[in-house]
Image (tube, rainbow, N blue to C red):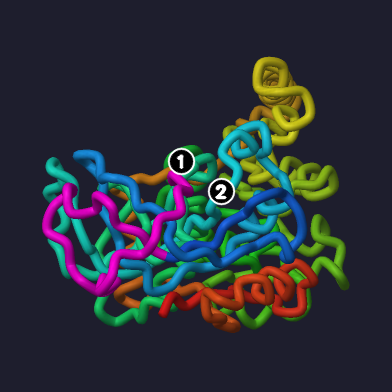
Amino acid sequence: MWGLVVRRASAGRNPDLGFRSASTTAGMTCRAVVVPRFGGPEVLEVRDGVAVPDLKPREVLVRARAVSVNPLDLRVRSGYGRSIFEAALPLIIGRDVSGEVAAVGSSVSSFTVGQEAFGALHPTAVRSTYIDFAILSEDELTLKPPSLTHVEASAIPFAALTAWRALHSTARISKGQRVLVIGGGGAVGLAAIQLSVAAGCSVSTTCGSGSVERVLAAGAEKAVDYTREDVESAIEGQFDAALDTIGVPETERIGINLLKKGGNYMTLQGEAASLADRYGLAIGLPSATAILLKKQIQYRYSHGIGYWWTYMRADAEGLDEIRRLSGSGKLQIPVEKTFPLSQVREAHRVKEKRLIPGKVVLEVD
């Protein structure tokens, strides 16, 4: 966990200085968005003088320029994952980041000071990115394409890595297959559409009426407005993989029924975290494992398909492909609005109330 030791800021310290070794972070402080207790957007505090930990051998210090606001950030702030994060309060949230390399650990070979990079942290990492200087491991970062601004780049990695994990690591999609994305209008859904198209797959998706044009522009061959059409009757044929970004019983039923034998259903809404929060890690995680195993056996016998809870995980191959596709314009997550880091409460408020349907990014000045 980031040690939230508040120190007096060193006189004359320039936050834009490039650092040359891990030892130079000793005694360094910066600004961060802190969650002192779980709750609504009003609990968020922007604090100065937050200590920057020393870098481990394979870690990279990134001078953040932009960080995106993910749904997970709002949920963690509200108490989701408290079985992991409560002991770390006050904690700093955030997963995506784009910025410049300010220092590298002693074993880092892929980055040098001054390079522009973007990446994302694992959902359960107690490190964070709503901060002037974020620490990521070497395999959680990749070089930012010059064609992308930091704002554009920061919106991509967490969503794209989540989709990559499901489609490539779990379903192992290949050219010529059919992919169904349930909830294609969100960041993960859009990333899944574009990654599937890049892999040579044909994609059908469900979305709200306001997202139909966007998902078609992203490469979907068929877009079904679930508010106006019956999804199962509107989508013809069966699919090799179904990624469900919504994860309610109705969408699970649809995804499973539209899969061919040997296909894979993947949902982002696994029950591990919620059960751990409810019953504690010792009881919650084994219970979640039992539920997952039961469903896997059930659907293997009833439908002949694989059933998976899927989560984002840093992946060097995935990050490299995400960098290549985003640099060539084949993977984009549109940013609807930006806020300065100092207005993080407002950014969370508008996302929580769904006043802004698309991606929101915090600019770190």
Up/down of 30 relative to 339, above or below? above
Task: Point out residue 49 in the picture as x, y percentages from the top left corner.
Answer: 42, 61
Question: Residue at 61% of width from left, 79% of height from top?
Answer: 214
Measured in 3D between alpha carbons, the distance from the residue under mark 1 to the one under mark 2, in whole angstroms, is: 8 Å
Residue 68 badge = none
45 and 122: which is toward the camera: 45
Task: Using residue 141 as the reference point, say whether residue 192 is left or right of it.
Answer: right
225 and 128: which is toward the camera: 128
Q: Report the amino acid beneath label 2.
A: Leu
Task: Using residue 146 as the reference point, say whether residue 236 is left or right of it.
Answer: right
Q: Which residue is mark 1?
A: 1
Task: Point out residue 64 in the picture as x, y percentages from the top left corner.
Answer: 37, 68
Q: Quadrant of residue 267?
A: top right
Q: Is residue 144 visible?
A: no
Task: Using residue 257 as the reference point, say whether residue 335 is left or right of it.
Answer: left
Label 1 with label 2: CB-CB less than 8 Å: yes
Up/down of 157 relative to 89, above or below? below
Q: Report the amino acid beneath label 1.
A: Met
Question: Residue at 73% of width from left, 41% of height from top?
Answer: 256
Q: Earlier in the sequence, mark 1 or mark 2?
A: 1
Crowding at label 2, few (<14), some or many (≥20) Cα neighbours within 10 Å?
many
Task: Point out residue 175 in the picture as x, y percentages from the top left corner.
Answer: 41, 53
- Would residue 306 be counted in the magenta stretch? no
Provide the major secondary structure of the magenta segment: loop
Element type at marker 1? loop
Task: Point out residue 172 in the picture as x, y percentages from the top left corner.
Answer: 44, 41
Task: Using residue 2 as the reference point, say whether residue 229 is left or right of it.
Answer: right
Residue 91 badge = 2
Crowding at label 1, few (<14), some or many (≥20) Cα neighbours within 10 Å?
some
Q: Which residues are magenta?
A: 1-30
